[in-house]
Amino acid sequence: MNTPAHEPVSLRLLDREFHIACAPEEREGLVAAARFLDDKMRELKSSAKVPGFDRIAVLAAVSIAHELLTLRGQHNTQEQSLTDGLAALRKKLDGLLDASVK
């Protein structure tokens, strides 16, 4: 099975350039993610007491991870609610079908 060739992509984070290899179909998403990260890092840099690149990168990573985990939790809660609702509807439908058969 042939895998697509990985190509280097140039990304800028706080005016620093990074080269990352990725498959062509991942390029757009990777560039968008880097833009998002750069925006988050710039936001944190403006309010950081010690604006070192490494510190800002770690703060951005923790902030984004927190947002991701919060969204995952909300998604799981909504998914469980939907699953419960569908189970209740199925139970009602089964009850109606059983009543109509009798």
Image: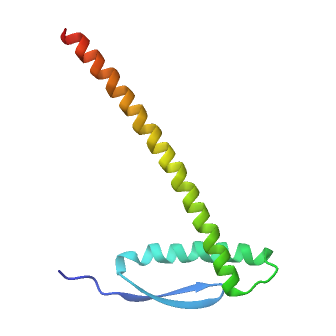
Residue 35 in the figure: left or right of residue 21: right
Residue found farthest to the right: 49
Q: 8 above or below 84? A: below
Give the quarter of the image for residue 17.
Answer: bottom right
Q: Nearer the viewer, residue 12 or 71?
A: 71
Residue 8 percent coordinates (x, y): 42, 90
Residue 84 percent coordinates (x, y): 42, 34
Instruction: Name the image quarter holding the N terminus.
Output: bottom left
What scheme was used to colour the molecule? Answer: rainbow
Residue 63 percent coordinates (x, y): 64, 68
Query: Which residue sits at x=82%, y=79%?
Result: 49
Number of marks in the rendered image: 0
Query: Which residue sits at x=55%, y=60%?
Result: 69
Residue 101 in the figure: left or right of residue 89: left
Instruction: Name the image quarter holding the C terminus.
Output: top left
Give the quarter of the image for residue 13.
Answer: bottom right
Residue 65 in the figure: left or right of residue 100: right
Query: Which residue sits at x=61%, y=63%?
Result: 66
Q: 81 above or below 71? A: above
Residue 53 in the figure: left or right of residue 21: right
Residue 89 percent coordinates (x, y): 36, 26
